[in-house]
Image: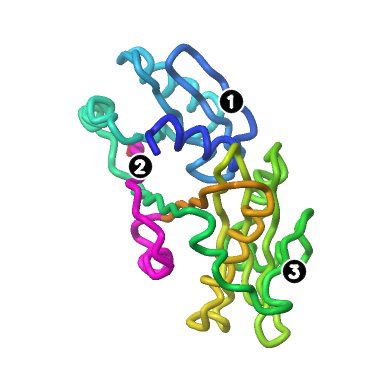
């Protein structure tokens, strides 16, 4: 997946509150929803003036000077470094054909796909730091979407979110309750997302994860998902 395709999938399945296109500059109004919905991006044809424009616009709406740097944007990366921007939260992309994770039937009452999110689903997210601002992002997704509730031993064990854009589905907001970690619940959650995505006609499943999250990256690798690059942020300190 090239940078443009990745960005389209992210913006469709985890959208900012508002987008502003100004030439090659795309501004995102995040409303405290995190980096992914707040970072500015620049497409081909950008200039130093566009960086200035982004900095001013982000300051005006109370957001930090933050850019998402996509694969192939080495020139932009160098320009930001020269301005004193620091590397911030490198992100890994994992992907696989949907059928890779639909080979096993999900045990009964293990994964529930639903919309709108149940109160218990939101409670699990909140414990993991996924608060109402991020739940609001899910609500803005225009296409097919589902909250995922995982259960183990008749207890809530985890939560996630999955949404489709075209023939791809992307998983977000994966959170496994502390008492249920190391019991395979992350894998069942991903398989539940794949089964749901297949029912929507999606052919590929993707998920993003900060490279610092070693446990989550190990999970996706253990499922034989392919590491497909990613992106990083640059933030002005």
User: Is residue 219 one of those drawn in magenta?
Assistant: yes
Residue 4 % position (x, y): 43, 29
How are the residues colored?
rainbow
> Rounded to the nearest whole Å, what is the CA distance between mark 3 and mark 2?
32 Å
Q: Nearer the viewer, mark 3 or mark 2?
A: 2
The residue at the point 35 percent across, 42 percent down is: 231
Read off the residue under disc 1.
Answer: 19
Q: CA distance from mark 1 to mark 3?
A: 31 Å
Tag 2 or tag 3, which sits nearer the N-term?
3
Residue topped by disc 3: 120
Residue shown at the point (78%, 63%) measured from the top left = 118
As helix, strand or loop, the secondary structure at mark 2 comes to strand
Q: How many marks?
A: 3
* Callout 2–callout 1 Cβ contact below 8 Å: no
Q: Nearer the viewer, residue 237 or 15?
A: 15
Q: Measured along the vertical axis of the image, is residue 81 above or below residue 156?
A: above
Q: Which residue occupies the foreground of this view, 63 or 27?
A: 27
Magenta stretch in the rendered image: 210-235
Tag 1–tag 3 contact (CB < 8 Å) = no
Q: Quadrant of the C terminus?
A: top left
Horizontal arrangement in the rendering, residue 176 relative to residue 225 (left or right): right
Percent x, y of residue 43: 39, 21
Earlier-in-chain disc, 2 versus 1: 1
Q: Is residue 42 above or below residue 14?
A: above
On the image, the x and y values in percent for residue 22 come to: 50, 14
Looking at the rendering, in which quadrant would you find the N terminus? top left
Q: CA distance from mark 2 to mark 1?
A: 20 Å
Please give the residue where the numbered disc 2 appears in the rendered image: 231
Q: Secondary structure at mark 3?
A: helix
From this viewpoint, which residue is outermost toward the bottom? 153
Identify which residue is drawn at 58% across, 31% down.
29
């Amino acid at each position: 997946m090239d940078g443009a395709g990745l960005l389209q999938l992210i913006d469709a399945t985890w959208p900012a509150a508002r987008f502003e296109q100004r030439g090659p500059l795309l501004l995102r109004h995040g409303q405290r929803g995190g980096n992914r919905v707040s970072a500015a991006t620049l497409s081909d044809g950008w200039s130093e003036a566009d960086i200035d424009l982004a900095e001013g616009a982000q300051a005006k709406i109370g957001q930090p000077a933050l850019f998402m740097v996509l694969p192939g944007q080495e020139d932009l990366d160098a320009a930001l470094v020269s301005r004193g921007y620091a590397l911030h939260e490198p992100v890994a992309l994992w992907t696989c054909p949907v059928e890779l994770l639909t080979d096993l039937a999900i045990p009964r009452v293990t994964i529930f796909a639903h919309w709108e999110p149940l109160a218990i689903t939101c409670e699990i997210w909140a414990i993991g730091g996924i608060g109402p601002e991020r739940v609001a992002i899910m609500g803005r997704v225009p296409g097919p979407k589902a909250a995922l509730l995982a259960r183990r031993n008749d207890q809530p064990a985890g939560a996630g979110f999955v949404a489709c854009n075209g023939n791809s589905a992307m998983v977000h907001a994966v959170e496994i309750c502390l008492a249920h970690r190391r019991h395979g619940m992350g894998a069942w959650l991903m398989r539940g997302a794949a089964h749901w995505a297949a029912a929507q006609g999606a052919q590929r499943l993707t998920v993003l994860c900060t490279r610092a999250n070693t446990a989550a990256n190990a999970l996706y690798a253990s499922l034989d998902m392919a590491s497909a690059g990613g992106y990083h942020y640059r933030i002005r300190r």
